[in-house]
Image (cartoon, rainbow, N blue to C red):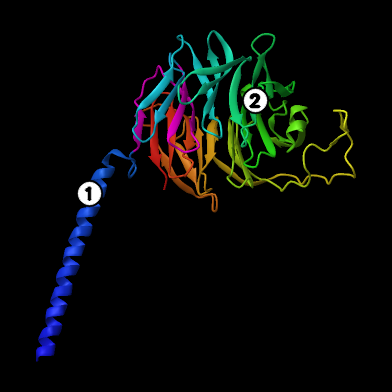
């Protein structure tokens, strides 16, 4: 009898403790949700900058640690730097009316941010100190439109266009040494109009340069060139880059997958294409140093590079692709197409994951960037809104 009463007493005690524990967990959950009321949760974004059509956003870039977001836009403040945790504007670069930055990029060490566009009365490539906001360097260049640091931070690649007779323009891409700021390599085709995007492969061995032509003239062979980049810095300084592959179709937006096995391209009035990237068979360039600073023939015949094939053409939507990006862990591919909502796909199945409509009616998305940890992504639109969305 006593044993039965003891068991009942113990059972009642355990039930009471379980009830207290459940209540505690419930309270803790409510506190956590309350604490996250100012953070990104659900489908609602965290707005860093409210809409203002005088500050059309053209480009976004996160710092390597994800704490800072650089915003390139139009207006008197073409570059703004936000703290994503506090939502505070840390500093902005003040310029004359009519200024804009069409491309921004952080250096891999997070100490500098580069921007390309128009200010100080000219087309420029500029580099700022992240901590102080001080302008460190300005390089004048015609119609610079896109910029990308190499993964090791040694090189800065910029693409744009050179004015020609009338209103036509000629594309160009160039490579600078970020230590000496010496121009190392330059490429300028004849037929196309401008370079819309440049992007480094994650290992730095390849450089993608996407070109565009206005009106989609089918007579012009436009597309993305893949350049092999020497691993030897001295060879890069001699400009020994070699063309590996030409991918047809204009490209104003490019994105490498985190492991470098895929390359997504999108142009004007085109579908979004995802290409399978074959492994490198040879090191670039296909030449060896002769000891006198001039290229010499390689030893033996190199293997013919494997052709790149389309892994998946995403037929819808079709239009002008402003920006595309892979999530850092490769779990999503996001695209910004003119006139359409932001769309995210699952790379494994290429099924549509989610869509995001602009917060302002009729406003168009212009830029997108994932945080380095892939937990969220930022969007920017023609109405000047900059928002941070949860991923997943």
Asked if residue 360 shows in the view, the reply is no
* Left or right, 226 with reference to 374: right
Q: Which residue is mark 1?
A: 31
Q: Residue at x 59, y 26 (%)?
A: 147
Q: Residue furthest bottom?
A: 1
SS at circle 2: loop
Near mark 2 (Cα within 10 A), the count class, few <14, some 14-19 or many ≥20, is few
Give the quarter of the image for residue 18.
Answer: bottom left
User: Looking at the image, which is closer to me, 152 or 37?
Assistant: 152
The first of marks 1 and 2 along the sequence is 1
Give the quarter of the image for residue 5.
Answer: bottom left
Q: Is residue 314 magenta?
A: no
Indicate whether 129 appears above or below 122.
below
Give the quarter of the image for residue 302.
Answer: top right
Magenta span of residues? 45-74
* Left or right, 106 with reference to 304: left
Give the total of numbered labels: 2
Q: Which residue is mark 2?
A: 179
Nearest to the eye among marks 1 and 2: give it: 2
Q: Position of residue 331 (x, y in %)?
A: 50, 49
User: Looking at the image, which is closer to me, 132 or 266?
Assistant: 132
SS at circle 1: helix
* Left or right, 59 with reference to 312: left
Circles 1 and 2, Cβ within 8 Å, touching? The answer is: no
Asked if residue 112 shows in the view, the reply is yes
Q: Position of residue 332 (x, y in %)?
A: 50, 46
How far is mark 1 from mark 2, CA to CA?
A: 50 Å
User: Looking at the image, which is closer to me, 166 or 392?
Assistant: 392
* Residue 237, disc: none
Indicate whether 141 appears above or below 326.
above
Q: Position of residue 110 (x, y in %)?
A: 51, 32
């Amino acid at each position: 009898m006593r044993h039965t009463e003891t068991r009942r007493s113990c059972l009642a005690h355990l039930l009471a403790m379980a009830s207290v524990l459940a209540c505690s967990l419930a309270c803790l959950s409510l506190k956590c949700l309350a604490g996250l009321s100012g953070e990104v949760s659900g489908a609602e974004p965290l707005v860093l900058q409210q809409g203002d059509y005088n500050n059309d956003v053209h480009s976004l870039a996160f710092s390597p640690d994800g704490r800072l977001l650089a915003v390139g836009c139009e207006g008197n403040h073409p570059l703004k730097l936000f703290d994503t945790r506090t939502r505070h504007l840390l500093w902005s670069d003040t310029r004359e009316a009519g200024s804009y930055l069409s491309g921004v990029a952080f250096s891999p060490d997070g100490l500098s941010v580069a921007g390309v566009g128009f200010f100080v009365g000219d087309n420029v490539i500029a580099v700022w100190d992240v901590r102080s906001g001080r302008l460190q360097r300005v390089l004048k260049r015609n119609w610079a439109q896109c910029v990308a640091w190499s993964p090791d931070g040694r090189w800065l690649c910029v693409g744009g266009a050179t004015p020609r007779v009338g209103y036509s323009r000629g594309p160009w891409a160039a490579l600078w040494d970020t230590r000496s700021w010496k121009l190392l390599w330059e490429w300028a085709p004849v037929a196309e109009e401008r370079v819309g995007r440049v992007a480094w492969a994650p290992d730095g061995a390849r450089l993608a340069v996407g070109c565009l032509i206005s009106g989609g003239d089918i007579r012009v062979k436009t597309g993305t060139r893949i350049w092999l980049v020497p691993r030897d810095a001295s060879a890069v300084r001699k400009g020994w880059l070699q063309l590996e592959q030409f991918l047809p179709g204009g490209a104003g937006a490019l994105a490498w997958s985190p492991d470098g096995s895929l390359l997504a391209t999108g142009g004007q009035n085109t579908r979004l294409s995802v290409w399978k990237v074959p492994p490198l068979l040879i090191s670039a360039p296909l030449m060896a140093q002769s000891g006198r600073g001039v290229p010499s023939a390689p030893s033996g015949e190199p293997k013919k590079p494997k052709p790149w094939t389309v892994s998946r053409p995403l037929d819808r939507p079709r239009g002008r692709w402003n920006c595309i990006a892979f999530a850092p862990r490769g779990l999503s591919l996001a695209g910004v197409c003119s006139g359409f909502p932001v769309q995210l796909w699952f790379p494994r199945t290429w099924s549509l994951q989610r869509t995001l409509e602009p917060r302002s009616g009729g406003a168009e998305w212009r830029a997108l960037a994932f945080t380095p940890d892939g937990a969220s992504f930022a969007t920017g639109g023609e109405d000047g809104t900059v928002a941070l969305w949860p991923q997943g």
